Image (spheres, helix red, strand yellow):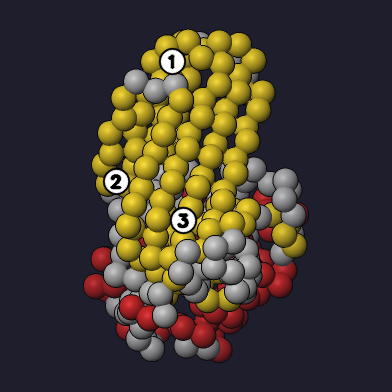
Amino acid sequence: MTTRYRIKHTSRYEYDRSVSASFNEARVTPIQLPWQARLESDLQIDPATWQYRYVDYWGAEVRVFEANGAHRSLDVRSTSLVELDVSRRPQPSELSWDEAHAADVRDRYNEFLQQTPATEPPTELADLAESIAADNPPSATATLISNAVHDAMTYVVGATEVQTKAVEAWAARSGVCQDYAHLVVGALRHVGIPTRYVSGYLHPASEPVIGETTQGESHAWVEWWLGEWSAYDPTNAAPVVERHIMIGSGRDYTDVPPIKGIVAGPHRTTGLTVTVELTRLA
């Protein structure tokens, strides 16, 4: 079954004084995949003088733009139309540990086996991951570790920031989807399963109503490689389904931030407002 969504993502930055210019990158456009077709996309910037697009090393579409002139606010408005058919997603193999740890796998997916400062797992979680891996095959291990992180954590908006590391979120036992994803990525890499951080959108309703516009959210989940990439949402302890829309993936959040940039001139950001509207059209 196919589903179709319109996504409107709006970010507004406000500064305490006029800044002279800003140079930015936006990763808010859904990527093309065998099971995800981007039918339309548009990005409006106010103020902006020019923009161009490219596909980065990790496969995400990046829109680069400059606001070249004095301004006290910056508005970024992205609109996309996407069609999903999760039945087209390749099914992973039931690899053994020897196959998952084979030299050619380690070589090909080395970047998704190396820890980053954001994903380095705390000792307690690393030990838990090892104990789960000792008693289960790779595919079951990946799911069980994801669910263990879900069970240990409490979802608390504002408990962490984008710079928060996995060890810090684990110590607090609270965080948001980014933290759940970083913890699972680190734990799976620790036991030798190539794993990547995924950025995208999630429709909050289990059964989205056609024609109804809902306040959605930016979201993060994980994909592990066991013959094919398998997607799982540790925040919700569930497989990724037709409510998840993928923007891109990387080693951790820093490879796929929605918007990042440089602002010229002394200033302080006094306000950031982000809204995501999702409408199921079919």
The residue type indicated by label 2 comes to Asp
**Distance between the alpha carbons at the discs numbered 1 and 2:** 24 Å
Residue beneath the point at 58% across and 69% down: 208
Can you tell which of label 3 and label 2 is closer to the viewer? 3
Q: Quadrant of the N terminus?
A: bottom left
For marks 3 and 2, give the CA distance: 24 Å
Name the one closer to the observer, 21 or 195: 21
Residue under label 2: 56
Q: Do residues under tags 1 and 2 come within 8 Å of each other at their CB atoms? A: no
Q: How many marks?
A: 3
Identify the mark nearer the N-term, 3 or 1: 3
Picture residue at 49% right of the left edge, 74% below the top: 241
* Residue 40 rendering spot, x and y as whole percentages: 34, 52
Question: Disc 3 designates what residue?
Answer: 6
On the image, the x and y values in percent for residue 63 come to 34, 38
Q: Would you identify the image quadrant in which residue 130 lies?
A: bottom right
Question: Which is in the foreground here, disc 1 or disc 2?
Answer: 1
Q: Are marks 3 and 1 in contact (CB under 8 Å)?
A: no
- Residue at point 54% right, 63% down? 211
Q: Amino acid at mark 1?
A: Ala
| Residue at 54% across, 56% down | 278
Q: Which residue is mark 1?
A: 21
Q: Secondary structure at mark 3?
A: strand
| Amino acid type shown at disc 3 | Arg
Numbered disc 1: secondary structure: strand
For marks 3 and 2 on the same chain, the one whose residue lies earlier in the sequence: 3
